[in-house]
Image (cartoon, rainbow, N blue to C red):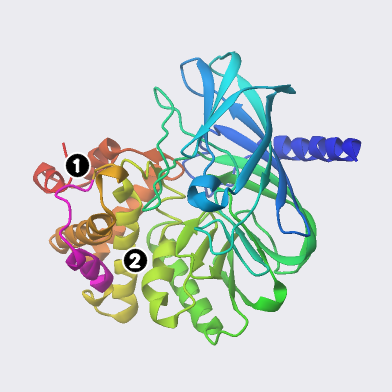
Amino acid sequence: MLFALVFISMMVYSIIRIYSQEPIDEKMNNGVPRNGANYVIDLEMTEAGTFQISAEVMVSNDSQESWSDIAFFFVPNEMNSESNSVEVNSISLAGNRVDYELDNGVLFIELESDLLPGKQQTVSVEYRLTVPEDGLRLTRSEKNVYLAHWYPMLAEYDAGWQVNAYDPKGESYETGYGDYAITYRLPDEYLIATSAPDGPAQASSSGTLIGKTIKDFYAAFLNPADWQVAERKSGETELRVFVPAESAILEETAELSVEAFAFFEQNIGEYPFAELDLIANDGYMEYPNIVEVPMDEALLDSILVHEIAHQWFYYLVSNDPYENAWLDESLTEFSTGLFLSDYYGDEDSGFQTAQAYKASTTPKPYADLALDEFDTAAYYATIYGEVPLLMKGFFDQQGGNEAALEFLAAYYEEFQFRRVTKQQFRDFFEGYFEGDQQEFLNSWLQS
């Protein structure tokens, strides 16, 4: 058995090494981002529903500094603190067990010797994962399992490790792009929906998933009896829509998904991946190449469209969501409003959700506050309400929604597969428009 596991691990490692060296699709017109880490993960679900997981993370030091330690976000216990979701069995470097510190969702591993610039280190983590019923993001519901933020995710390094304590009101973790090989073994056959291209929706109990240029790998194992599936093509991308078996909104969900996806691809920029999955489980959350959306038809237009738009602003253009959540959330909500305005033929009705968020409480004077500087109500009023409406007001003076989409398309082209900072956004904004834009930017961003 041990030999078989070692053999499988070696084979998967070879696959991802070869795969990661393949030339990127020409549609990725800004080139491939540097990969801070590549992941080879083996997971096995027991009959009891727990997971035995072995993760090998090939970490590359792409900075100009030597590292004495490596930091990961490892947040299952913080997401569901009462259930103690993770039990770490061992952490090792090159086969040697090492000491580690896991606190507030941040895993620090001390290195035996400094990792020099340009060098690599493989980190192996063996652990058991218990997925709680009705958990936050990482959760199970009867025989359906949703694995979100379930593995050690390499943090970003920028003159030090960019780590923060877990904060459930938003995203308190920032991860870079990487390649993934995930081997799974399950006690029964499940529908598989992940950040990798999964192919036609067919039940499976084992397999290997290969995903390239992903910043956060999500996997759902769905009981086939609980779901109905629609598969639709939009451009070069297959949209797979999973809706509860008893639901009457499969066609409505699929049609709106195609409409929104096509709008963003045509107006903002091409989506360079073969598949996008949508799961109607009321998760209201975005992940690379897969989103969790409402079961309720009344919420489809505002939430489903928002989560699809996140593929452009969060995934394909990346940012630090802890320090500057507005760079993805506000641009995503603004993009959602632009789509809904076009969809309903009314430039104002598309922004009703943003108006409701803003009216819910007094927004903060500035959007570029760290996540822990917001209370929950002010966070939503500011990031999802105030900023999208400020941008709408600005573009109303610049040519309206068409001008806004042209700006977003230029921004996407410039920063696709890159990590954008507040200053880079400001510089791009200033360079795009004629005249000094400082007064507008300083009205909601600290200089």
Would residue 309 be found to the left or right of residue 436 on screen? right
Q: Is residue 360 magenta?
A: yes
Outermost residue on the bottom side: it is 248
Give the mark nearest the N terminus, 2 or 1: 2
Q: Residue at x 46, y 33 (%)?
A: 156
> Which of label 2 and label 1 is nearer to you?
2
Which residues, given as a range, are shown in magenta? 351-367
Query: Label 1 neighbourhood size at 10 Å, few (<14), some (14-19), many (20+)?
Result: some
The question of residue 352 being in magenta is answered with yes
> How many numbered tags mark residues here?
2
The structure residue drawn at horizontal position 51% and vertical position 58%, both measured from the top left corner, is: 137
Residue 306 lies left or right of residue 258; in this view the side is left
Residue behind mark 2: 336
Tell me where residue 279 appears, x and y as whole percent.
56, 69
- Cα separation, mark 2 vs mark 1, equals 24 Å
Q: Secondary structure at mark 2?
A: helix
Q: Identify the residue under disc 1.
A: 430
Which kind of residue does numbered mark 2 sit on?
Answer: Thr
Residue 44 disc label: none
* Extreme residue toward the top, this view: 113
Dot 2, how many residues are within 10 Å of its Cα: few (below 14), some (14-19), or many (20+)? many
